[in-house]
Amino acid sequence: MIGLISINYKHAPVEIREQFDFSDDQKSDFHNILKNNYDVEGLMILSTCNRTEIYFEYENHIGQEDKLMHAVLKALVDFKSFNESLSPYIEKKTNKDVVEHIFRVIAGLESMIVGEYQIVEQLKDSFIFAEKKKMLGPIINRMVQKAFETGKFIRTYTNIDKGAMSVSYAAVEKVAQKFDILKIKTLCVGAGETGALSIQYLNKKGCKDITITNRTFSKSDKLANQHNINIIPFDELKKTLELVDVAIFSTSSKESLLTVKEVEKIVSNREKEILFIDLCVPRNLPKEIGDIERVKLINIDGLKDTVNTNYNKRKMEVVKAESFIAEFLMDFEDWASFRQLRPSILSLKNQFDELIDLDTEKCNCCNKSLKNCDKFSHYQSRLSKKFAGRLIQQIKKVSNNGKNEQALEIINQIFTNGN
């Protein structure tokens, strides 16, 4: 019914994840490939710094999960021109496991920073885009709506996100471990949510000298005024890097912002070591700059020690959240299972009505055919509802509301065969 291919920070390092980053245009293109070649009926792609997740729907392919999963996986590898084996880096899930996974994702249980809220906005953006482009199927649509409901409930009735950290926080913690943060000069490159959080945490730690730059000057200007920090035009980036102690990169650029040669030149014009922190996927900085003398490079995967501390603090809240997820999962399962009975139920009603329509017997009261008699038409409607209602109750009982796959297969064969 639904499938998931997840390439996330737990199994795939940043150099793999960045190859599977999806722009909005690529999401549309990939949807067209799956729809036209594999009859996938719904698609949503979540693409963040820590994960790329492809949720797909295949309601008319029940029993072909493995075959379709392989097809979607092959289409993904071809689409991204990935030449290695992707198997070591992915999680594959179907049906109930997909639903449980997305409930955990939106609650922040699958995030690198447990409980962080940014994933909610990211999932919302992915959902709105897929909805706008008419990529969603009814099951994914309902699943994501239920996920939002689940996440809201968990964040209301647990402390999973109370004081929750972010990758920006983890980055600033790294800076504080290495430097006297009151005395350093810091440059934040990028004015999005991650960049704004980096500035916020630096301020809280007491950093006095913070500068921001961004390709779109108006965005960085707004943050500079809000936090009373310095601002430079983006074309002064390299010159400014000769003067700062720390540079935190968090832009949405799909290409490296600096080359190895450019960094070597920057380092040659300064005496002290410089710390680069790259929070981006795809990365803003090539990994080779970490080999340059007097350069320390940390990417997003280098923050896991801080992440583990965060997880240990939140273990009890995770347990609470998981118990709530189990309850919401049961609600969705009931809906999804009953949905599988719909073809039989609709076919049953249609077959009953067709039998009446084919009947040529005349009505005694008006001498019209039964199907054209107003009185009989009303009686037919009542009879159809009563008869179908009783049978539907028996179908639901025998199939455990659609959860018994063996019974469901027999029922669908009986009532939909030939229609």
Image (tube, rainbow, N blue to C red):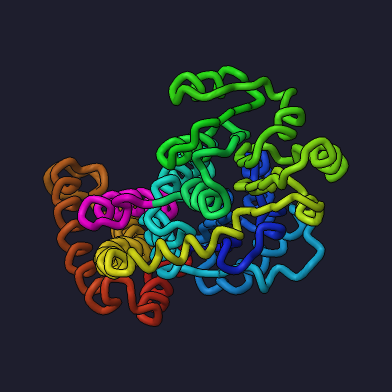
Q: Is residue 172 left or right of residue 257?
A: left
Residue 296 or 377: which is nearer the viewer? 296
Q: Is residue 167 visible?
A: no
- Image x and y of residue 374, in percent: 17, 41
Front one among 66 and 264: 264
Q: Position of residue 56 (x, y in %)?
A: 54, 57
- Which residues are the magenta region? 138-164
Please tell me whether residue 274 is drawn above or below residue 360 in the rendered image.
Answer: above
Between 74 and 356, the one nearer to me in the picture = 74
Q: Residue at x 70, y 52 (%)?
A: 296
Give the quadrant of residue 316.
bottom left
Which x, y percent locates residue 352?
Answer: 29, 60
For the question of whether residue 62 can be seen, the reply is yes
Is residue 340 covered in magenta?
no
Which residue is depicted at the point 61% across and 41% down? 248
Image coordinates for residue 113, horizontal then vertical, percent: 45, 57
Residue at 60%, 61% in the rendered image: 7
Up-down relation of residue 176 to residue 267 (above or below): below
Which quadrant would residue 232 be assigned to in this image?
top right
